[in-house]
Image: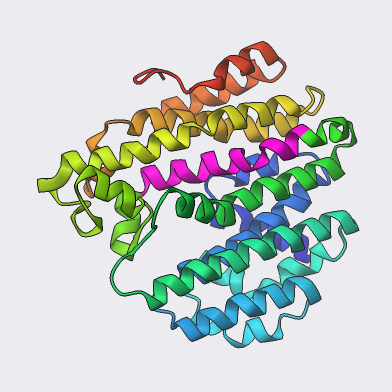
Amino acid sequence: MTDLDWCRIMLPKVSRTFALGIQMLPAPLEAWLTVGYLLCRVVDTVEDTEDMPWATRRRLFTAFEDALTTGNTAAFEADSNVFPEHADGDLSRNLRRVLTPMASFPDPVQEAMRRWIGEMCSGMAVYARRHACEPGRTTLRDLPDLERYCYFVAGTVGHLLTDVFLVGVPEAQPHAHQMRKHALGFGLLLQMTNIVKDVTDDWPRGWCFIPQTILTDAGTNTDQLLDPEYKDASLHAVNKVNVHAQRFYADAVAYVLAIPQSAAALRRFCLFPMLLAGKTLNLARNNPAVIDAAAKVKVSRDIVMQTAAQVEALLTDDTAIGALSLVEPAGAQ
């Protein structure tokens, strides 16, 4: 089995959301983004693995960046025993098998991965250090801090996708300026949607991505976020982030429209998560489930299937895509 084949086997084990979209891409984009996604997932695992001392986490972030640049995974492997026995841990312990295929990719693709995934890694390290060194639950400070965090974990991905798309799909080159202009907003929309819907998952992990200034203005704080006594104030705060996330929907629409109609696979790859993000934000708006640990904000399977069909209807209809510039009214599915 080649290392690229191994990567293809690992992809659906560590991704429920993006694996199918990546697998549907034409060659060579499928191989490039399989490897790119898995590298991002390794960085996520370094950030998310619980009960890891900061000194170890810091060494792993540094060693990952070095391996990304040099291909030498020895320093990373030296600490890889800290990863848990699950798919993400197996992936991380085998970083070498992900980097080997990358070395065969065109130079511009390798350069894009080193630049953007490296920046993701260094940015995540900043927030991981804050989490390790500040007492209590780590809370983002204000909207600029929220956007900065989202830039590191998702805006970088928007830029990476754009650079890779432009190498793999030459007909997209005339649209490079527009794609790069809106790539950040596309990434921020998806990440802020995750923050809105995952409040109750992040809180017990010691994280609050709803900024402190928004919580204060709403009359609550991090410790009270899931307290039923403060549910109105907490829901108001989460709604503020929801509204802020919606501001990036037009960027995502513009990004899709910048992809030429002839590159249908790329449009499909971007349209599906964009539409689901809009529907998720609609579902979460004024929904007490976002602050109820016993509930979950998640679009139904039927809505997912309807969205997949909607994507196919929209692929070559720029007028209809352009009409999506605003998130649908509350309740519209």
Name the side, left or right, on which 134 lies relative to 27. Answer: left
Read off the magenta span: 178-198
Quadrant housing residue 295: top left
Q: Is residue 158 left or right of residue 264?
A: left
Left or right of 271 on screen, residue 82: left
Residue at image location 26% in from the left, 38% down from the top: 236
Q: Is residue 153 visible?
A: yes
Q: In the depicted view, which residue is nearer to us: 98 or 285?
A: 285
Q: Is residue 322 above or below residue 196?
A: above
**What secondary structure characterizes most of the magenta part?**
helix
Is residue 296 at all visible to an observer of this figure? no
Residue 44: x, y in percent?
54, 63
Type of colouring: rainbow
Q: Nearer the viewer, residue 263 or 250?
A: 250
Q: Position of residue 173 (x, y in %)?
A: 87, 35
- Percent coordinates x, y for residue 190 in the rendering: 52, 41
Q: Quadrant of residue 135?
A: bottom left
Q: Is residue 194 magenta?
A: yes
Residue at image position (69%, 20%) is 315
Q: Is residue 197 magenta?
A: yes
Single out the residue that lies furthest toward the top. 319
Q: In the figure, is residue 31 to the left or right of 302?
A: right
- Is 128 located above or below residue 268 in the figure? below
Q: Residue at 57% of width from left, 52% of height from top?
A: 151
Q: Position of residue 122 (x, y in %)?
A: 61, 68
The quadrant in which the N terminus is found is bottom right
What residue sits 72% from the left and 50% below the top? Answer: 160
Q: Vertical placement of 200 versus 80: above or below?
A: above
In this picture, is 8 found above or below 176?
below
Quarter that holds the C terminus:
top left
Total numbered circles? 0
